[in-house]
Image (cartoon, rainbow, N blue to C red):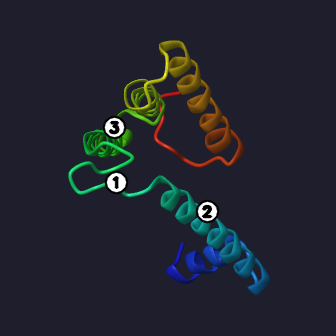
Amino acid sequence: MSEAALQEQLAADRPPHAGPSSQLGAAIVAGFIGVGGLIGSLALGLGRLTQPGPRSSVLTAVAVLTLVVFAAVLPLIGFEIPSLLLAFVWLRFLGRESWISSVVTSVGTVAAFYVLFVLVLQIPLPRLI
């Protein structure tokens, strides 16, 4: 297949561009989410220099580290196991949820993501199943 034919095929398969009203709607929704996050973060307060509030910097560092590990192993072993472990670690150890709640929520979340992204949206995620 020639380069021109390939470009033509790709152009034919591309969905139509969103119009101005769709772009405006997306911007408004994103703006409301941002304003909501800003209001929520201001309500939490900053704390003091010696006692930052409301989150511990160690917990934040652990959360960032687990995301880095997640991103590193995702292409190697798929999204199921890393996602399950990430959700469990965040719920059980960072969020201090109960063991049962952490296991049930982690499994349910990964199952829901699998159904949504792999089965419904057919996004080619690296996966074991």
> Closer to the N terminus: mark 2 or mark 3?
2
Relative height, residue 82 to residue 43 (above, below):
above
Q: Nearer the viewer, residue 55 or 6?
A: 55
- Amino acid at pointer 1: Gly
Q: In percent of the image, x 31 and y 45: which residue is there?
A: 60
Q: Which quarter of the figure is the N terminus placed in?
A: bottom right
Q: Residue 47, which numbered label?
A: 1
Label 3 crowd bin: few (<14), some (14–19), many (20+), radius 10 Å = few
* Dot 1: element: loop
| Few, some or many residues within 10 Å of mark 2 (<14, 14–19, 20+) | few
Between the residue at mark 2 and the residue at mark 3, the CA separation in whole angstroms equals 36 Å
- Left or right, 78 with respect to 16, comes to left
Q: Is residue 58 left or right of residue 14?
A: left
Is disc 1 in contact with disc 2, using a CB cutoff of under 8 Å?
A: no
Q: For numbered disc 2, what is the local secondary structure?
A: helix
Quadrant position of residue 114: top right
Which residue type does callout 2 highlight? Gly
Image spot of residue 57 (x, y percent): 27, 46
Q: Which amino acid does label 3 sit on?
A: Leu
**Which circle marks residue 19 in the picture?**
none
Q: Residue 76 carries which label?
A: 3
Q: Nearer the viewer, mark 3 or mark 1?
A: 1
Count of picture labels: 3
Q: Where is residue 52 in the image (x, y as percent from the top left)?
A: 29, 51
| Camera-side residue of 84 and 92 | 92
Q: Which residue is drawn at 34% across and 54% down?
A: 47
Looking at this rendering, what residue extends furthest in the top direction? 100
Circle 2 sits on which residue? 36
- Whether tag 3 and tag 1 are in contact, CB under 8 A, the answer is no
Name the secondary structure under disc 3. Answer: helix
Please state the horizontal and vertical placement of residue 119, each as a whole percent of the image. Answer: 68, 39
Separation (CA) of disc 1 from disc 2? 20 Å
